[in-house]
Structure formats: structure tokens, C-alpha cells
Amino acid sequence: GAGVSQSPSNKVTEKGKDVELRCDPISGHTALYWYRQSLGQGLEFLIYFQGNSAPDKSGLPSDRFSAERTGGSVSTLTIQRTQQEDSAVYLCASSRDPQLNYEQYFGPGTRLTVT
Amino acid sequence: EDQVTQSPEALRLQEGESSSLNCSYTVSGLRGLFWYRQDPGKGPEFLFTLYSAGEEKEKERLKATLTKKESFLHITAPKPEDSATYLCAVRGYGGATNKLIFGTGTLLAVQP
């Protein structure tokens, strides 16, 4: 079946502009996660959705970052007033019921470059 | 604080030369340890989940093992197509989150 999809695959934006990144999880997966991968660093957790609610937003680095999920499916990560340090690959993952410890499946990522 | 350390950072092998990658972890109660493979420009690809010490899982030339403090990914007779970054991650019981804590990975290069 179809895997996790993300769009756009690449985004170049000017410092100070807002950007929206989209994630389509695997059909039927109730849990959705956003991570960030910076050059030379490990994947860094941003936010976790169970259905449309976000029980854990602890990884969002500042109030410029926000995310929402609608219909228990598509999620959008929004970065306002982008800064150069926001440049990274943003990865989305989804899983079946996380209480049963199912593995997370990742999308291809969105490479964000802030100039 | 949950933490994952992977070693070595990079490993170069000749085709057919077996070796092991290490993942050391500290976590407040282990719910699961996960191995992923990541190719350049792509998202991580799931390989294995290990839940308890002593558990082992195999897939083709890869075998993952788990102790109470570390996990090993053994690569037997590797081929050039095994070249990738291998990531280790843990999920603990702390808090309401189901997030994964990742190590920084081991970059494996297998030369023909």
C-alpha cells in the first residue's frame, strides 16, 4: 500500500517568511509524528498526534512552530517568521495504535532551506 | 533523561567483511528499541523492533540483538547495497509521549 507522503519535497524560503509543510500518513494509522533532522545531528522529536489531538508538543522549539491534524489524517506543520536555524529536513512518521508499540513509518521528508 | 549513543560514527568495510554496529542506551523503562536504515535524501526505513534483553531478530544479512544496556546490529558478509546510515532509537515508558529518541547513526560504506 501507499506509504507516508510529504510535500513539498524541497522548499526554499527567505528569512522571515511563513512556510507550511504537509504530511499524509498511511491510511488507518491513528498516530502521527513530526521530527526534524539537522546536518550532523540525530532526528529530533517535534510533536505527536493521536487522532486530531496532540498529547505531546514538547519538542516544538519555539512558538513560531505549530501543527495541526484534521480528520485524523493529514497534518500540517507551520513555521512562522522562518529563521536560518530552521533549515533542516522535516520528517513525518505514522504508526498504528502506539499503545501497542507499533513501529513508526517515515515519509521522505521535506528539505527546508531558509536564505 | 533518555539517551542513545551509536558507535562508530562511520565504518568502511570490504564486501564480505562482517562487522557490528553498537547502540548504547539509557532509558526510564524500555518499551522498545528500533533499528532503521536511511539512504541519502530519503526517510528512515524500518528494520527491526526489539522489546526485551536476550531478544534477537534477523533479516537477510542483518541480525539485531539486545541487552539491558545496548543493542548490536550484526552485518554478515555485507554487499555494497548495504551502504547506508543505520539509526537506532528507543521508546521509554516516561510521560504521555510515544516519541522515539534517536542516536546520530552509523554511516556504513561497503566497498566492492
Image (cartoon, helix red, strand yellow):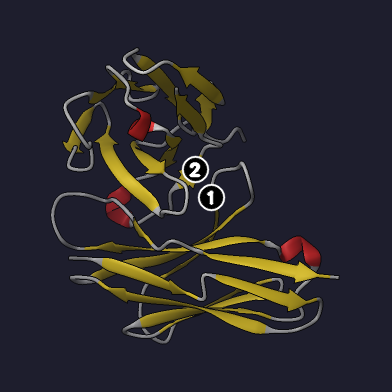
- Say which of B112 and B78 sits in front: B112
At label 2, the amino acid type is Phe
Q: How many marks?
A: 2
Name above or below for residue A113 compared with residue A29: above
Residue A31, above or below B89 = above
Q: Secondary structure at mark 2?
A: strand
A39 or B83: nearer the eye?
Answer: A39
Residue B103 horizontal/vertical position (percent): 40, 63
Residue found at the far top of this picture: A17
Which image quarter: residue B55?
bottom left
Q: Disc 2 marks which residue?
A: A106
Disc 2 crowd rating (10 Å Cα; few below 14, some 14-19, many 20+) is many
Which residue occupies the foreground of this view, B77 or A113?
Answer: A113
Residue marked by disc 1: B44
**Where in the figure is residue B78, as x and y percent of width and height?**
75, 74
What chain does badge 1 belong to? B
Name the residue located 37 percent from the left edge and 29 percent from the top edge.
A84
> Residue placed farthest to the right in the image?
B112
Q: Amino acid at mark 1?
A: Pro
| Disc 1 to disc 2: CB gap under 8 Å | yes
- Looking at the image, the residue that sits furthest to the left is B95
Q: Is residue A27 above or below residue B19?
A: above
Residue A55's x, y, as percent? 17, 38
Which residue is more in the foreground, B62 or A108? A108
**Dot 1, crowdedness within 10 Å: few (<14), some or many (≥20)?**
many
Q: Image quarter for residue A75? A: top left
Rendered-image quadrant of the C terminus of chain B: bottom right
Quadrant position of residue A58: top left
Image mark for residue B7: none
